[in-house]
Amino acid sequence: MNKPKQLTFPWSKPNKSSLDEFYFDEANHELKKILDTNDDIFVYGIKKTGKTYLLQALCNKYADIDKISLYLPLADASKLDAKILDDVEHMDIICVDDIDLIEGFKNWETAIFNLINNSQTSGCRLIFGSSKNSSTINFSLNDLKSRIRKIDQIEVFPISDSNLLSAFEKISKHRSIKIGDKELNYLLTYTERSISSLINILNKLDELSIQQKRKITIPLIKEII
């Protein structure tokens, strides 16, 4: 039996995230380099800078080359029993999102601590995502605090306003989504100027245009926003 490329959990769902389409501007060039290594990484930054997208994209990258990956969003997973992390360290990569959300939850802190220790033995790569720098997360388990702070950290910076149009053009072109300059400028004028929000809108526009067999026009955009 072929081994699964991605482990399935209740929150799992297909996504189009790809490192090839993520727009790395000048501020995030170092981030791009470290993602291409095999090192464990702690990725942090303010909300809606694309952290979740990057973690999902890394899992997709590993799955595409027949390696086993797991995307673990702690905002959803922490509602379940922490035992779901038992014996998952045999995978090639595990991306743990929103690790700051388990601050003070002893059972989950212990599970993540054990995951780190077991992964060091098994060779599983760990990527953590957080809205906080690890130095500001007050885990109740001191051993976890120590382990996390030893992992290389890198900040995800927001894409500058001057590069948002270029970023959006790259993403839409990569997905073969036809959208004109007038429509792009309309989106940038009347929607939240963050890459996370723009990708979310692009996904909805693409789906709606296919369903209704319509071109992406300003009237169609108005139905979404």
Image: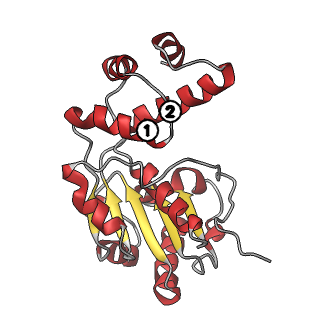
Evaluate if marks 2 and 1 touch, with contact meaning CB atoms under 8 Å apart.
yes
Label 2, label 1: how many angstroms apart (C-alpha)? 6 Å
- In this picture, is 166 found above or below 134? above
Which kind of residue does numbered mark 2 sit on? Answer: Ile
- In this picture, is 159 found above or below 143? above
The answer to which image quadrant residue 91 occupies is bottom right
Q: How far across and how far down the image is residue 46, in percent?
A: 30, 45
- In this picture, is 100 found above or below 1? above
Q: Is residue 1 left or right of residue 90?
A: right
Which kind of residue does numbered mark 1 sit on? Answer: Lys
The answer to which image quadrant residue 165 occupies is top left
Q: How far across and how far down the image is residue 158, in percent?
A: 26, 43
**Residue 63 in view, yes or no:** yes
Circle 2 sits on which residue?
A: 177
Q: How far across and how far down the image is residue 133, in percent?
A: 28, 58
Circle 1 sits on which residue?
A: 173
What crowding class fits label 1: few (fewer than 14 Cα within 10 Å), some (14-19), or many (20 or more)?
Answer: few
Return the residue nearer the eye: 9 or 23.
Answer: 23
Task: Write the residue at 31% across / 29% down.
Answer: 193
Q: Number of callouts in the render?
A: 2
- In this picture, is 195 found above or below 113? above
Q: How far across and how far down the image is residue 131, in percent?
A: 34, 51
- Looking at this rendering, what residue extends furthest in the right direction? 1
What crowding class fits label 2: few (fewer than 14 Cα within 10 Å), some (14-19), or many (20 or more)?
Answer: some
What quarter of the picture does the N terminus occupy?
Answer: bottom right
